Amino acid sequence: MKNNPIIIGIDPGYDRVGVAIGQKEQNQWQIFTYECIQTNKKSKLFDRYQEIAKKIEELICKYQVTQAGIESLFWFKNQSTALNVSEARGVIIATLLRQQIKIAEYTPLQIKQSLTGYGRADKKAVEKMVRMELALDDKIIDDTIDALAIMICHECSRKNKL
């Protein structure tokens, strides 16, 4: 499976970052990993950002990632949370750019539209489609489901541009 890009899907955050890496060849997904990077709540914020960058860089190198899909920010009611997530997202983007990864960003509406055909679909509908597309049945937390959805969305978007 060397023809198509190896894609990392990222659901950004500073407390938890969903990450999924896979490649689709001949309508078949090969999933290399999916996980949630959970930072230590007791650590200083910059240490948490550094932890995220280090882990993402390790995954990029280990799986030879070539393209990334990342969720764009949407409106937050809590401004301090929005600022921290924005900063973490910037750290993630800088890490991807340092590794010369081609990046595309997707809104939650685009991701839902891509997976379910309906931009206002709920989390359960998105999760159901992720599980069907990737044939997954294990317990997966929300952030990781979102990263898998972003990875699938990126592949769909990439295919539509060919």
Image: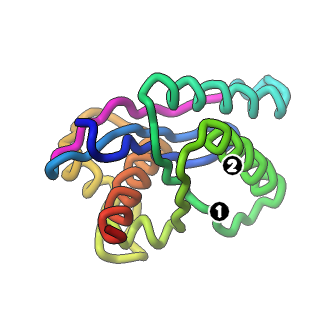
**Residue at 75% from the left image edge and 28% from the top image edge:** 50
In the rendered image, residue 14, in percent from the top left (x then y), is placed at 70, 40
Q: Is residue 6 above or below residue 104?
A: above
Q: Are marks 1 and 2 in contact (CB under 8 Å)?
A: yes
Rate crowding at label 1 as few (under 14), some (14 to 19) or many (20 or more) other CA atoms within 10 Å. Answer: some
Q: Is residue 83 magenta?
A: no
Please, what secondary structure does the residue beneath circle 2 have? helix
Q: Which residue is mark 1?
A: 73
Tell whether 73 sits left or right of 46: left
- Position of the C terminus, as image quadrant, is bottom left
Tell whether 48 sits left or right of 71: right
Q: Is residue 32 magenta?
A: yes
**Residue at 27% from the left image edge and 43% from the top image edge:** 3
Tell whether 32 sits left or right of 144: left
**Residue at 49% from the left image edge and 39% from the top image edge:** 19
| Badge 2 amino acid | Arg
Tell whether 117 sits left or right of 147: left
Q: Quadrant of residue 111?
A: bottom left
Q: Quadrant of residue 124?
A: bottom left
- Position of the N terminus, as image quadrant, is top left
Q: Which residue is mark 2?
A: 89
In the rendered image, residue 125, in percent from the top left (x then y), is placed at 31, 62
Rate crowding at label 2 as few (under 14), some (14 to 19) or many (20 or more) other CA atoms within 10 Å. Answer: many
| Badge 1 amino acid | Leu
Q: Is residue 58 above or below residue 80?
A: above
Tell me which segment is drawn in magenta: 28-39
Please, what secondary structure does the residue beneath circle 1 have? loop
